[in-house]
Image: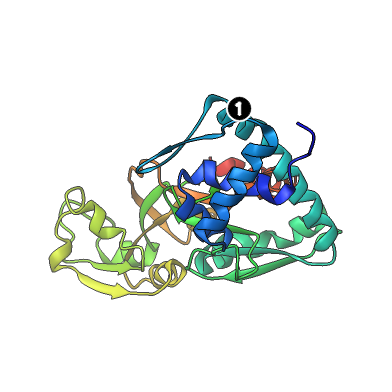
Amino acid sequence: MTRKPKLDSLRVFEVAARRGNFRLAAEELHLTQSAVAQRIRQLEATLGVALFVREPRGLTPTEVGRRYLTDLQPALAMIDEATRRVAWQDRPLTLSVTPSFAAKWLMPRLGDFREAHPGLDLKLEASERLADFVTDGVDFAIRQGRPPFGEGLHHERLTRLNLCVLCSPAYLARQGGAIDLSDLSAQTLSDDVHGLWQRFTTQLPGQAQARRLRFSHTSLAIDAALSGQGIVLAPRLLVAQHLAREELAVLAALPDDDEGFYLVFPEARLEEARRVLLPWLSAQLDPAR
């Protein structure tokens, strides 16, 4: 090999190998399919090796191609991170969170984050919509649910959902000090956009006859329960402060499989996530694990 490969060709190769298809690679890179194919041919000519086996339904990296991809991905990630540090050094780190997570958990802890990272400006965006990380300027997102969250996105689970059935002491007293969860037909259920109640119709029967209060955000459903308006099904993380102050009582805990709160971000941001956000979030969430 007498020439060094061009950086843009290496990026095209990485995407094509990861997506296994020239068309999908072209869509991700905002190039034409022919341009992607041409750059792969140029790279193979420069290296003097075949990187892919062309098949009717897509691409399969050769053994050399697989090894090359394994070696290239960390190097490209390092280049992206170094470029980001230079180009975005005066730009705040933008974290997208759900409104309920922001209100019930994150806001009281922002002071601690500023003390831990005094030189870092943090910008919060409260939204239920999953960020696209390309056009919206979001760097990281915290979302409730289960993976996967999108093509090319990395996720780290912060904590399980640990779902609880809860009500206020005042509501419980009005029910005679006990609530029969085997028949919810006479109760008022506080529901939100996640529709958690509907997942447990077998374990918590009688829901079809129960009165409903429906809210767009979990925090509002929790607030309704706090004011004695009904029973709420919510993640323990979001009600921890209310439990500590004995403002809510736990009637039951429910299984949640692999659901939880996840930090979601592009794979290129993994180093920054491990350096900044994950250590702080893990320390804050340790009691909730």
Q: Residue at x 75, y 43 (%)?
A: 78
Image quarter hosting the N terminus: top right
Q: What residue lies at 66% left-to-right and 62% top-to-bottom? A: 108
| Mark 1 residue element | helix
- In percent of width and height, residue 126 lies at 57, 71
Q: Quadrant of the rendered structure where residue 139 is?
A: bottom right
Q: Residues within 10 Å of mark 1 (few under 14, many from 20)?
A: few
> What amino acid is found at the position of numbered circle 1 in the picture?
Arg
Front-most of residues 13 and 150: 13
Look at the image and tell me whether residue 146 can be seen. yes
Q: How is the image coloured?
A: rainbow
Residue hosting label 1: 67
Image coordinates of residue 72 in percent, x first then y, are: 68, 36
Q: Can you give x and y, in whole percent of width and height, for residue 98 in the image?
A: 52, 65
Give the percent coordinates (x, y) of residue 185: 15, 64
| Above or below, comparing residue 169 to residue 274 in the picture | below
Give 244 or 289, whichever is nearer the viewer. Answer: 289
Q: Is residue 249 left or right of residue 18?
A: left
Dividing the picture into quarters, in which one does residue 255 lie?
top left
